[in-house]
Image (cartoon, rainbow, N blue to C red):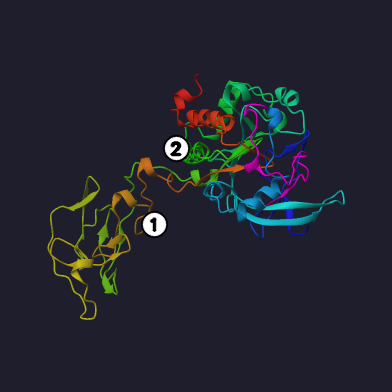
Amino acid sequence: MSDLTPCEHQVGGWHNGTQSLVLKDKKEGLVVKPVKLHANPTHDPTFDPSHYTPHTHTNEQELIPVCRNELEFYEFLQTSTDPQDVSLKALLPLYHGSRLITTDEAKVTPHLLLGDLARGMKKPCVADIKMGRSFTYPGKDFTKKINKKYATRDELGYCLSGLRVFDPDTGALVVELRPDACKQLDRSQVFHSLEMFCQRGHPASRHLRDSVVSQLRQIHQWFMSQKKYWVRCSSILVIYDAATLTTTHTDSQVLPDTPVPLTTRHIGSEVLPDAPVTVTTQHSDSKVLPDTPVPLTTKHSASKVITDPPVTLPTQHSSSEVIPEKEACADSVGVKVIPEKEACFDSVGVKVIPEKEACADSVGVKVIPEKDACIDCVSVKVKMIDFAHVLYSFGHRDDNYIFGLEKLVEFFNAPDSESNSE
């Protein structure tokens, strides 16, 4: 237990009114989740679904579990060659096996070892969304109990069962909802909570929502193509790092405040200084500026730097630095300069970065187009979790899960002004 600590970003994982203690192995980057050994008391390991035909697929009394518990289901997926099972694995956290752990109550309990989706995140925002209108599974009268808990399950087909949101500017924890609080939420409160999770009003909000929708549609595609399982009491976990949303946005017109003295000389494929030059901008579309000491003034035209007036000056290259023409970009006087990966260096040592790809200029001044600023670097992860109750579907789609999934896509896909208005 010395390497294990409580998982600080756990928001769900409750059982019988008590939160299950999910642990974290920071050294290995794993979430360590306890297994409820007899999650499906009616499971029969000798059952062969190929020799069974249910009377009706709508009869809850005929539901038959695939495995005894979640650990068995994960182990089953690792060895299955069924294309549907192989596809499903990509939608789940990575499975790293299991481990026996002695709990504080001196009980030895098997734990799942799953990839930590929040690994490396400074301010992980987490939404645990329980899917489906029905949470019934065989062996337990669950219906009466669940009807008292989540008010939105019949209407929306999903319930918010846990939420954690950080403010990207201050880093403060602004929302933390546990399952006991979530069961009190009505439809409008669920929408409001999810709007906060999406950082409504922040420039990255639309990107967050679109990224969630894209990954939810991958899950939806899997459910629409498979008729093997019904998945009950499962959740979708959405997680991103609020700390990645803190970089200042600009209108891509950032220029250095003071002239930058530069000199130039060629070494390999880089252009290094060899005489003072005053430069007042770093924007370019790969045009090369003269490399002889000349005071330059610049104008923006689209994302191009235009010298005023044009100057044509000789350039000196050493004989050992022949640059292939086909790999080089040319300036107005035919001087070839090798691009360094995606960017070029102009002849005064200023890195020339196309506007659409610009992140920082050659002197460290960030140049970030407004619509793309610090947005594309935000990683949003959407995974299916909790597979203690997977049932045979006997050739029928899991409409219970699909209904909620489509409603969830509808929410995240709506414009900010509409998703909370209905």
Mark 2 and mark 1: span between their CA atoms? 31 Å
Query: Callout 2, which amino acid?
Result: Asp
Q: Above or below — where is 92 with respect to 400?
A: below
x and y percent of residue 245 in the render?
A: 49, 43
Q: Are marks 2 and 1 in contact (CB under 8 Å)?
A: no
169 relative to 142 in the view: left or right? left
**Rendered position, 236 above or below 189:** below
- Horizontally, residue 364 falls left or right of residue 33, namely left
Q: Neighbour class for label 1 at 10 Å: few (<14), some, many (≥20)? A: few
Would you name the residue on which mark 2 appears?
Answer: 210
Tell me the chief SS of the magenta region: loop
Please state the horizontal and vertical placement of residue 265, each as a whole percent of the image. 26, 72
Residues in magenta, as a range: 31-59
Instruction: Tell me if residue 53 is in the magenta stretch.
Output: yes
Q: Which mark is first along the chain, 1 or 2?
A: 2
Q: What is the quadrant of residue 399 in the picture?
A: top right
Rendered position, 82 above or below 326: above
- Give the residue pinned by disc 1: 364
Instruction: In this rendered view, identify the residue nearer to me: 281 or 161.
Output: 161
Callout 2: few (<14), some (14-19), or many (20+) C-alpha neighbours within 10 Å?
Answer: some
Query: Which of the image's four quarters has the N terminus?
Result: bottom right
Estimate the x, y position of residue 262 in percent, counting from the top left.
29, 65
Residue 409 visible here? yes
Q: Is residue 154 left or right of residue 169?
A: right
Q: Is residue 31 left or right of residue 219?
A: right
Amino acid beneath label 1: Gly
Q: Secondary structure at mark 1?
A: loop
Q: Which mark is residue 374?
A: none
